[in-house]
Image (cartoon, rainbow, N blue to C red):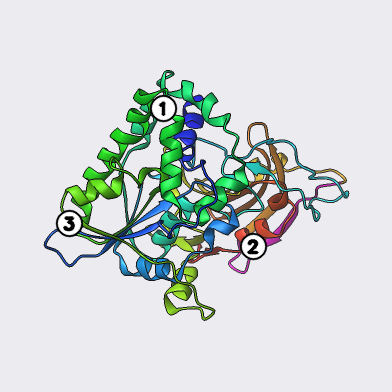
Amino acid sequence: MYKIGCLLFLLSCFPVFGQESDKEYQLLWEVKPPKSKKVSYVFGSMHSNDPRLFNFPDSLYTAFVSVEAVVLETDVTQIYDQYDVRLNLFNFDLFDKKRSFASSRKATQTVYGSEDGRPQFLDAYFQQTGYCGGKGFYQLETVQDQLKLAENPELFNTRTAINGLFFTKEAFIQTYINGDIASLTNMLKSQFKSSPEAYDELITKRNQTMVKGLDTLMRKRTVFCAIGSGHLYGSDGVLQLLRQKGFQVRAVKATYSNIVSAEKKLVQSWRSYAVADEEDSFRMTFGGKPTKLEEEDKQHYIYQELGQGNTFELFIHTSSDYLDDNRYRFLENEFARTREFVLDEGAKGIEGLVLDPIKGYQWKRLIQFGNVCYELVCYGGNKFMHSDRPTKFFQKFEILTEKE
């Protein structure tokens, strides 16, 4: 847990310095390799799910549609099965009105924001939208690379100093919205003035690693690269390092229109990802590309909304008795009731609430179809658990073949 917490700190600490600025928008940059017509883009990101950060200019949608692949600092889906981003995990008003779920306005806080924000934090949004749009994906660092930094206690002595800044959350969000990466980077350097070795390890060396990867990728294909905005600016920043390698780099003006562009409509339509097994016996639609985990006794797909802290899972068990053997796990009391049903295909099912000793309350549906049992599980924050989203998730599962 400590390692993952530090990893999330690596992903999120750098853009949190800010002040109001009238400088030109500096978040989106067009990048062309030397002697090439390929056009790629670098975007300064903030690792947050605050809704205001998603008010993208029209030029960003145009850029995103035009490229072949998305590039991030690391593959955020690799932490799907390792870390729960919800805070105050068991502090839910689940039974506040004597029924299995009821309307509740209390938002659960997460590492990347809260349930009042967007489902994914900004980086994960680009990765998952790219997957849903059929784009490739590349990472500039591995999770293991970042964990090595997280394990260095000398570097993370600076965390206390960073958290002690007098700038409010609203101040740095406004600075980011203004696109003022110069102020973000200058304040970052000032903060690390007494720890130049930490700045070198956490910023300068990582900038060089990222540019090495981008140099290789951008010469072969067009990409949309989203990295922390604190990595872009300055003589040791990613943009200047790309220029030194002969790349043409220019800022892309932020343009906004009252008319929704075709590119914006297209990107906003990339919101689902379907999976099926080799025999096409089922289809399950997730909000993005799930991770398939290799497990000996079952198939397991998992998808997480890292911004809001919601998790969606599908387990496939080869067993003719799994539903009956696990019927006892569902909660049965005056507040929670299980529901049993039969599908048109002849499969029998059961749905209700369970209490996992580690992950807390979960909505679960079991569908027994011959010698296979499909187990659908979803859980999240207080708002999610009191909403109809679990039911909508369950309804996205389809059985495609008949069993004798």
* Nearest to N terminus: mark 1 or mark 3: 1
Left or right: residue 2 versus residue 386 is: left
Q: How many marks?
A: 3
Figure check: 196 above or below 117: above
What residue sits 23% from the left and 50% below the top? 242
- Give the residue type at disc 3: Arg
Residue occupied by mark 2: 392
Q: Residue furthest top?
A: 154
Of residues 18 and 160, the one nearer the viewer is 18
Does the magenta segment cover residue 337? yes
What residue sits 45% from the left and 52% below the top? 180
Q: Which residues are magenta?
A: 335-347
Of residues 61 and 105, the one nearer the viewer is 61
1 or 3: mark nearer the eye = 1
Q: Secondary structure at mark 3?
A: helix
What residue sits 40% from the left and 23% below the top? 195
- Of the numbered discs in the image, which one, if any, rests on residue 258? none
Residue occupied by mark 1: 193
Within 10 Å of disc 2 (Cα), the crowding (few <14, some 14-19, many 20+) is few
* Nearest to N terminus: mark 3 or mark 2: 3
* Nearest to N terminus: mark 2 or mark 1: 1
Residue occupied by mark 3: 219
Residue 70 in which image quadrant: bottom left
Left or right: residue 344 versus residue 44 is: right
